[in-house]
Image (cartoon, rainbow, N blue to C red):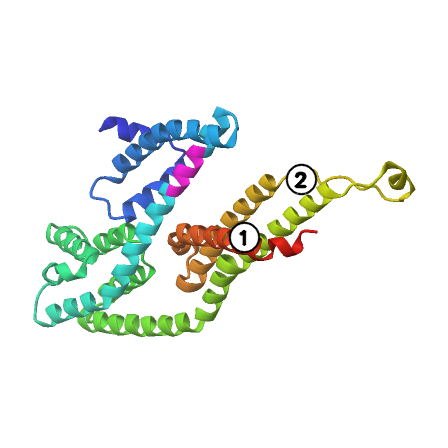
Amino acid sequence: MKLYNLTTKLVPGKLRKRLLYAVQNAESVYPAEKVLGFMILFLLVLSIGLSFFVALITKIGLGYAFLLSLFFLFFSSYLIAVVQADKKAKLVDELLPDALQLMASNLRAGMGIEKAMMLAARPEFGPLEKEIYTVGKEVATGKDISKALLNMTKRVNSRALEQVVNLIISGLRSGGKLSELLDNSAEDLRRQKIIKEKIKSNVQVYIIFIFVAAGIGAPFLFALSLFLVKVVIANFANIDVPTSAASSIPISIKSVKISTSFILKFILLSLTTTSILSSFTLGLISKGKAREGAKFIPLLILFSIGVFFLISYVIENVFGNFLTF
C-alpha cells in the first residue's frame, strides 16, 4: 500500500536504511518498505495505548510515557528483526558447505552455472534454497552472475557467504575451475566451524560465571541488603532517647527517612539493568555478537527477580527474629 511506503519515507535516511536492512534480512515474504511502514503505524497506535498504562504505573506525564513506550516498542521490534536476521544468517552458514559441494558436483557433471545453482536449491537447505534458486533464475534470465550473487549477499547478513561470493566472482573473472573453487571453499568453511566450536567450549567457564553472578550473586546481595535496611529502620524506630540524655550526646539520633519501597524499586531496576547488560555480554562471548544475547534477557530478568524474592523470603523467615532487638 502507498500509505506504508509513505510512512517509511518519513523515517530519517540513515535510520531508514538500517531498519530496511534489518527487515530485508529477516526473511520477510513482503517488500521491506511495506513491512517497515506497517510496523511504524502499528507501533505508533500500540504506543498510544501503552502510554496510558505506563503513566498510571509510573506516575509520570502522559507525553513522557508515550515517548518511553514508543522507544521501548521500536527498540524491541528492531532487536527482534536483527535477531531473526542473525538466525537466518547462522542457518545459511551451517548449510553453505553442503550447498557449495552440491553445486560443484553439478558443475563437474557438465551443467552450466545457472542450472547447477537451481538444481542445488533443495528444501533441506532452508532459507539458502530460496536464495540459490533466486540467483539461478536471475542468471538464467540474462542477469550478470556477479550482480546476482552480490544481490544475494545484501539479502543475507552472512560474512561467510559474502567471502564465498567474492571468491567465486574472483574465480570467474580469472578463469579458474569453479568446481574446485567451490569444493575448497566448502572445506575451508568446515574447518572454520570446527575452530569456532573449540573456541566456544573454551569460553563456557566465563558464560557460567556471568550467569551465576547476574542470576544468583546479585539477587542474594540485594536481598541481604534489603533485609538489613529493614532491620535498621525497625530498630531505629524503637529507640527512645530521653530529651535530657539526647542533649548531652555529641551526635543526634534521628529516624531513617528512606523507605523500603524506594529501595525495592531501586533493586528491581538494578536487577533488570544488570540482566540486560549480562545478556548482551553472554551473546558477545558465546556467539561473537552482543545482540545474540537478546534472547536471554527475559529469562535472566525473571530468574534474577525470582531468586531475589525467594532469598528475601528465606532470610526474613529464618533470621528475622534473631536480628531484631
- Categorize mark 1 by other alpha carbons within 10 Å: few (<14), some (14-19), many (20+): many
Determine the residue located farthest toward the left in the rendered image. Answer: 110
Q: Residue at x 63, y 39 (%)?
A: 259
Above or below: residue 20 compared with residue 114:
above
Range shown magenta: 69-76
Q: Position of residue 225 (x, y in %)?
A: 62, 52
Most foreground residue, 52 or 109: 52
Q: Is residue 254 visible?
A: yes
Q: Residue at x 19, y 71 (%)?
A: 177
The rendered magenta stretch, by its main secondary structure, is classed as helix
Identify the mark nearer the N-term, 1 or 2. Answer: 2
Above or below: residue 261 compared with residue 168:
above
Determine the residue located farthest toward the top in the rendered image. Answer: 62
Kind of element beneath mark 2:
loop
In reply to whether residue 205 is colored magenta, the answer given is no
- Categorize mark 2 by other alpha carbons within 10 Å: few (<14), some (14-19), many (20+): few
Determine the residue located farthest toward the right in the rendered image. Answer: 248
Q: Quadrant of the N terminus?
A: top left
Q: Position of residue 214 (x, y in %)?
A: 51, 57
Residue bearing mark 2: 258
Give residue 312's mark. Answer: 1
